[in-house]
Image (cartoon, coloured by chain):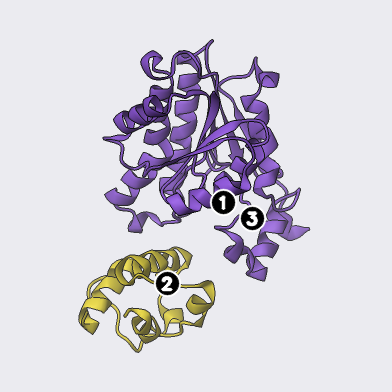
Chain colours: A purple, B yellow
């Protein structure tokens, strides 16, 4: 049976992507917390398998994932990496642990997972399309975002290089969302000032995960069969806006 | 953690010299108390004391002592 492998599915964007994509795919959902993954599964259609795993365990992930795939006798046709660690942190607060954890989750894990899913012994030639959930900070900059921003630039670098190395069998693209209202950020948006600031900065208003899910589905599908190595910015116009909004 | 140790942590967070802070100082009078310092403060308090400071709490801080009071 053909499956889509989705990381970061226990909450936020990942959970909503799981629900949306479960309409057209059988899913393998990953996250750290088994209970929360079960909650996600309960919201999904079709077949859903759960793989609880901490993606920062980079020394073991290849072996553990390979064993798990063999044990379940499944073929994986698509991979969406939605797991992401984001901590706003001024440079003076940065230490090697947060750098390691962020890059392990945001960059090392998707590379190692893609390696396993393109191994002929583990997954044959089944993998066809990969989508990384990046961020609109990938090509930009913001104060207190050096760790996260660098990791997302790294993720998009990975995306472009894999797109070439794995062509023509596997297409690799990324979606670059802007700030969205999710489980994780809804407290932030309950502050009127923050909400107003966001509304001013987003020409199309504040987005939700439902706004990026169709872009992910498009990049996974055959409708995008001549597209690889691309960043698809879905951020309500946030990063192309050069209007001085406080003067409007 | 003693008050002296807490002040030392704060001095590191504010990126000021050792002994530069005392509890009575008004935060408004400290040049280094800017938005990046406030973010560093959130990170430090979460890491050292396991608490998430809210924007409202931070706005409420007037003196160094107010910050020391949440460092428990």
What number is the disc on residue A23? none
Give the Cα separation between the discs numbered 2 and 3: 30 Å
Between A233 and B20, the residue placed more toward the observer is A233
Q: Is residue B65 above or below residue A62?
A: below
Q: Do the residues at discs 1 and 2 belong to one chain?
A: no
Q: Quadrant of residue A240?
A: top right
Q: Circle 2 marks a residue in which chain?
A: B
Residue at image position (45%, 72%) is: B53
Residue at image position (50%, 16%) is: A126
Q: Is residue A215 above or below residue B17?
A: above
Q: Which residue is mark 2?
A: B33
Describe residue A225's horizontal placement relative to residue A3 as left or right: right
Secondary structure of the residue carrying tag 3 is loop
| Residue A127 percent coordinates (x, y) | 51, 19
Label 2, residues with CA under 10 Å away: few <14, some 14-19, many ≥20:
some
Give the Cα separation between the discs numbered 1 and 2: 33 Å
Q: Which residue is mark 3?
A: A181
Between B12 and A204, the residue placed more toward the observer is A204
């Amino acid at each position: 049976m053909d499956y889509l492998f989705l990381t970061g599915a226990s909450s936020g964007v990942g959970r909503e992507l799981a629900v949306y994509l479960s309409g057209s795919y059988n899913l393998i959902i990953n996250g750290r917390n088994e209970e929360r993954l079960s909650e996600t599964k309960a919201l999904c259609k079709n077949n859903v398998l759960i793989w609880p795993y901490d993606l920062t365990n980079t020394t073991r992930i290849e072996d553990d994932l390979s064993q798990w795939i063999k044990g379940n006798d499944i073929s994986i046709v698509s991979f969406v990496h939605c797991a992401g660690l984001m901590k706003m942190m001024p440079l003076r607060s940065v230490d090697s642990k947060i750098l390691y954890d962020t890059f392990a989750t945001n960059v090392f894990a998707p590379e190692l997972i893609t390696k396993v899913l393109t191994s002929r012994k583990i997954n044959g030639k089944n993998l066809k399309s990969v989508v990384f959930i990046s961020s609109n900070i990938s090509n930009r900059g913001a104060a207190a975002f050096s760790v996260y921003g660098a990791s997302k630039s790294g993720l998009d670098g990975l995306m472009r290089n894999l797109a070439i190395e794995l062509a023509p069998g596997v297409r690799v693209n990324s979606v670059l969302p802007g700030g969205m209202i999710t489980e994780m950020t809804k407290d932030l948006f309950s502050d009127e000032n923050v909400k107003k600031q966001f509304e001013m900065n987003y020409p199309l208003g504040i987005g939700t995960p439902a706004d990026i899910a169709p872009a992910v589905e498009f990049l996974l599908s055959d409708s995008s069969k001549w597209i690889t190595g691309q960043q698809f910015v879905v951020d309500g116009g946030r990063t192309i806006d050069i209007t001085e909004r406080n003067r409007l | 953690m003693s008050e002296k140790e807490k002040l030392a942590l704060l001095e590191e967070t504010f990126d000021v010299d050792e002994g530069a802070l005392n509890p009575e100082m008004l935060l408004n009078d400290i040049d280094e108390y800017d938005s990046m310092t406030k973010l560093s403060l959130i990170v430090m308090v979460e890491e050292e004391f396991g608490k998430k400071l809210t924007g409202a709490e931070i706005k409420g801080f007037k003196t160094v002592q107010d910050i020391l009071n949440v460092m428990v």
